[in-house]
C-alpha cells in the first residue's frame, strides 16, 4: 500500500504565495510520475502540474509562470510553489503518484489540502 501526506494549504489574499508539500511512503519500488491536481466545488478534477519520466515537467496553462513544481525522486516527495495566487486558484489540491511494481503501474492519491484565495 502507498500513503501520501500533503501539507501547506491555507488561506491567502490574492497576490500571495503558498508552498504545498507531499510525501509518499509505503511499497514504492519505483515511480515514473508525481503530480498535483486540484478540484474546485462543482468542477472536475484538473491537472495543475506534473513531473514525469515520459514528458518532463508540465503545467496547466493558467498557472504557467506562477507555479513551480519540484520533485525528489529518491525521497518520493513533490512540492508546489504557488506565487501570485488568484481567486480562481481556490480549490482542494491533491497529490498524485504513479508507482511501478512488477511491471504494473498503479495510481495513488492523497486526501487533499484546501487552498483558499480571497480577493
Image: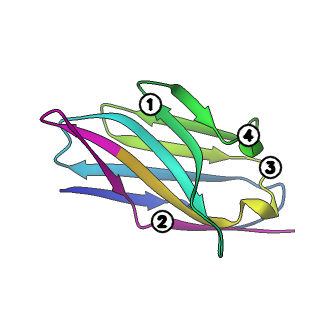
**Mark 1–mark 3 distance (CA, rounded to whole Å):** 25 Å
**Mark 2–mark 4 distance (CA, rounded to whole Å):** 22 Å
Q: Which of 35 and 55 is in front in this view?
A: 55
The magenta stretch is 98-119
Q: Residue 20 at x, y = what percent?
A: 55, 53
- Secondary structure under tag 1 reads strand
Q: Nearer the viewer, mark 1 or mark 3?
A: 1
Q: Residue 38 at x, y = what percent?
A: 58, 59
Q: Nearer the viewer, mark 4 or mark 3?
A: 4
Farthest residue to the bottom: give it. 42
Tell me which residue sits at (12%, 35%) in the image. Answer: 102
**Mark 4–mark 3 distance (CA, rounded to whole Å):** 15 Å
- Secondary structure under tag 3 reads loop
Tell me which residue sits at (33%, 43%) in the image. Answer: 98
Q: Does the magenta stretch include residue 55?
A: no
Residue, disc 4: 61
Q: Which of marks 2 and 3 is in front?
A: 2
Label ID, residue 99: none
Residue, disc 1: 52
Q: Which of 101 and 72 is in front in this view?
A: 101
**Mark 1–mark 2 distance (CA, rounded to whole Å):** 20 Å
- Please say if 47 is above or below 91: above
Residue, disc 3: 84
Q: Tell me, yes or no, whether the two marked residues, 1 and 4, touch with CB atoms within 8 Å.
A: no
- Secondary structure under tag 4 reads helix
| Total numbered circles | 4
Q: Which of marks 2 and 4 is nearer the N terminus?
A: 4
Residue, disc 2: 112
Q: Earlier in the sequence, mark 2 or mark 3?
A: 3
Badge 4 crowding class, 10 Å Cα cut-off, few under 14, some 14 to 19, many 20 or more, is few
- Secondary structure under tag 2 reads loop
Q: Tell me, yes or no, whether the two marked residues, 2 and 4, touch with CB atoms within 8 Å.
A: no
Amino acid at each position: 500500500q502507498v500513503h501520501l501526506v500533503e501539507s501547506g494549504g491555507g488561506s491567502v489574499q490574492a497576490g500571495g504565495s503558498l508552498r504545498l508539500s507531499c510525501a509518499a511512503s509505503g511499497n514504492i519500488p519505483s515511480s515514473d510520475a508525481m503530480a498535483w491536481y486540484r478540484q474546485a466545488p462543482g468542477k472536475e478534477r484538473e491537472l495543475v502540474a506534473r513531473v514525469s519520466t515520459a514528458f518532463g515537467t508540465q503545467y496547466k496553462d493558467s498557472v504557467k509562470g506562477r507555479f513551480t513544481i519540484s520533485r525528489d525522486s529518491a525521497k518520493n516527495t513533490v512540492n508546489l510553489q504557488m506565487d501570485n495566487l488568484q481567486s480562481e486558484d481556490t480549490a482542494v489540491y491533491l497529490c498524485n503518484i504513479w508507482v511501478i511494481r512488477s511491471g504494473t503501474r498503479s495510481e495513488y492519491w492523497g486526501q487533499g489540502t484546501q487552498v483558499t484565495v480571497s480577493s
